[in-house]
Amino acid sequence: MTETKVYGHRGSMGNYPENTLLGFHEAIRQGVDGLELDVHMTKDGEIVVIHDETLDRTTDGTGFIKDLTLNEIKQYSAGSKYEYFTKFDASWSAEKVPTLKEVLELLKPYDIELNIELKTYVFNYEGIEEKINSLVEAYGNERRIVYSSFHLPSILRIKKLEPAAEIAWLLNQPIPLLSDYLKGLQLNALHLDKQVVLANVHQWKDLYEKVRVWTVNGDDEIKQLLDLKVNTIITDFPEKVLFFKSERKA
Ligand code: G3P
Ligand code: MG
């Protein structure tokens, strides 16, 4: 079995503004194996990297992504709101909501994996899977891409468009016979909330090779999941998880 990988959640959102080019750069600098990000679709059909359905929480703008054009969204800062990072720098206010294309271009020089989470469980962004598929074909083909979603139909559409695509179902509650979903729906992995895993670590033990766990930030839970050899830990603090990993090797 290969060793547990570390993905930066929304970049490195414990220390830098989430889902920004700055945050992705910083996560790469810390040495992550991969990045996790979230996508929505604008009024004019552009794929943007942002967690919520609206601009309100993470930018100085307001409104639904689906009701705004990319140009309108680009007016706002995605780096000026202090939520949970542990430091703040005034220069961060220059950060904008990135497009998926911009992130794929940023990643070009780096050999890291990318987990694209399709935020498709609230609004029906008609055609979003086709747009993402085209962008990845044009700009991201050289790296491992993992498509995930709480909304199962979205990842199944991706698989139809790209039969070799790696798809993963996101779950925040336990479901019986998960291995049958993996097999029956040809899912490549499950992305499980840490509570689901830690509530009964034995229940999932045969699946850990195909399980990525989010969002793992506490020292004890990081160590426990490293012991369990889950496929990947998705964390807001990649540097810390990478440090715990390196300690084990020393
Ligand atoms: O992909 C793992 C995790 O990001 C799912 O939850 O709400 O942080 O996007 P959320
Ligand atoms: Mg996410």
Image (cartoon, helix red, strand yellow):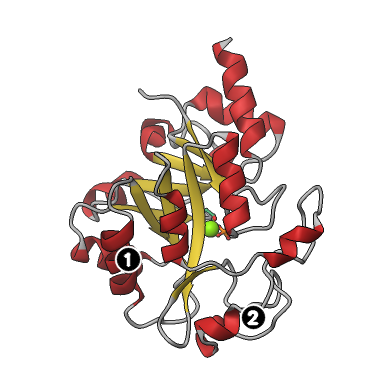
- As rendered, which of 219 and 92 lies closer to the eye? 92
Which three-letter amino acid code belongs to the residue tagged 2? Answer: Gln
Q: Quarter holding the C terminus?
A: top right
**Residue hosting label 2:** 75
Q: Quadrant of the N terminus?
A: top left
Q: Position of residue 249 (x, y in %)?
A: 54, 13
Q: Residue at x 64, y 77 (%)?
A: 55
Instruction: Answer few, some or many: residues within 10 Å of disc 2's Cα (few below 14, many 20 plus, some between 14 and 19).
Output: few
In x, y percent, where is residue 113?
Answer: 40, 44
Q: Whole-Å distance between the Cαs marked 1 and 2? A: 23 Å
Looking at the picture, how far across and down is residue 32, in whole percent? 52, 37
Crowd around label 1: few <14 · some 14–19 · many ≥20 (10 Å): some
> Does the numbered disc 1 mark a residue whose Cβ is under 8 Å from ligand 2?
no
Q: Amino acid at mark 1?
A: Leu
On residue 241, which mark appears? none
Horizontal and vertical percent position of residue 240: 67, 32
